[in-house]
Amino acid sequence: MDNQPMTLQDLIHRLSPNVRRAWNHRVDEMTLAPRIIFDYELLYMEKGELTIRVENETFVAEPGDILLFKPGLEHAFVESRGECWMPHIHFDVLYYEDFEQVPINFKNRSECTEEELAWLRPDILGRAFGFPNVLRIGNHAEVHKTLMQIIHAYERRDADYPLMQKSLVLRILYLLQKGLKANDNAHLVMHQRAMERAVTYIMEHYNETVPLETLSKIACLSLFHFSRIFKQTFDLTPHQFQIRYRIEKSKELMMFNRLSLSTIAEKVGYSNVYSFSKAFKQTEGMSPRQFMRTNSKST
């Protein structure tokens, strides 16, 4: 599986996190000799300061910083200042059958055996998702809250834990991606509520013609700025978003109602079956009739 090229979307579909260890680690001082790990470690700097080296890069971690130590990258804790509170977890992002056998490693690469090096996971979060070693993001408090939920769940490990820990790690990955995106696109955060108002209007009037001018007025932005920010936010133009929403509504009607295609086309805002069928096939890769044959509710 590791040698097969996968798109980011493929990887997202395959995500199945498992937490190996979880600690609410608090010490008066902290150092750590150079080592590599086989999995991921995510550490939240809650209190104190740590001077950390990752490969050839040295930096100081301060409260609010999130550290992501990746498989195979040598790192060391050089020195600390003040009492250090460092809740952290070791985890895999994909399912591996040897999950239970892989230990937390404290040796450098030269000290590891070939058998141990075979445990190294591919760096999916760094290479595919673009997560850096240090994350300084505005929503770090949400990450800390979720991290503590994982730690508390790990300490109890009741019957709900296996599913809970997967959902919480996925939430952390989502928060990290959201925080990094906000760093790169500060203007999108500023206009988030305006985009929500605009997209809500599209969804409430999906079967009508929605002029761009109307949406830009709702967002209180010029036509140019509205169009640019909408596309950056949703990866679709307003028109493409409306088409996608119309198609989703048409699929609901085809699955749960015995209506003709012409009636469905009219209900979702198309003047004729031809225009509806063309839009449907472009979006879904099949005709409406093909979809109905495989998905309609049987009677």
Image: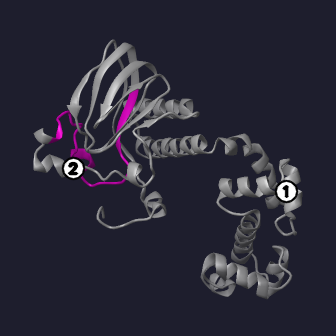
Numbered circle sitting on residue 278: none
| Residue situated in front as seen by the camera: 261 or 276 | 276
Is 282 drawn above or below residue 74 in the view shown? Answer: below
Is 73 drawn above or below residue 48 in the view shown? Answer: below
**Secondary element type, mark 1:** helix
Residue drawn at x 24%, y 49% is: 120
Separation of marks 1 and 2 at Cα, in angstroms = 52 Å
Residue identified by numbered label 1: 215
Residue 78: % across, % down = 28, 23
Viewed as shown, does residue 53 lie left or right of 216? left
Where on the picture, by quarter, is residue 216? bottom right
- Please say whether residue 230 is visible from this viewpoint: yes
Numbered circle sitting on residue 119: 2
Label 1 amino acid?
Leu
Q: Is residue 102 magenta?
A: yes
Residue 199: % across, % down = 77, 55
Range of magenta residues: 87-109
Disc on the earlier residue, 1 or 2: 2
Residue drawn at x 33%, y 43% is: 70
Disc 1 to disc 2: CB gap under 8 Å: no
**Secondary element type, mark 2:** loop
**Within-10-Å neighbours for mark 1: few <14, some 14–19, many 20+:** many
Label 2 amino acid?
Trp
Depth check, mark 1 against mark 2: the one in front is 1
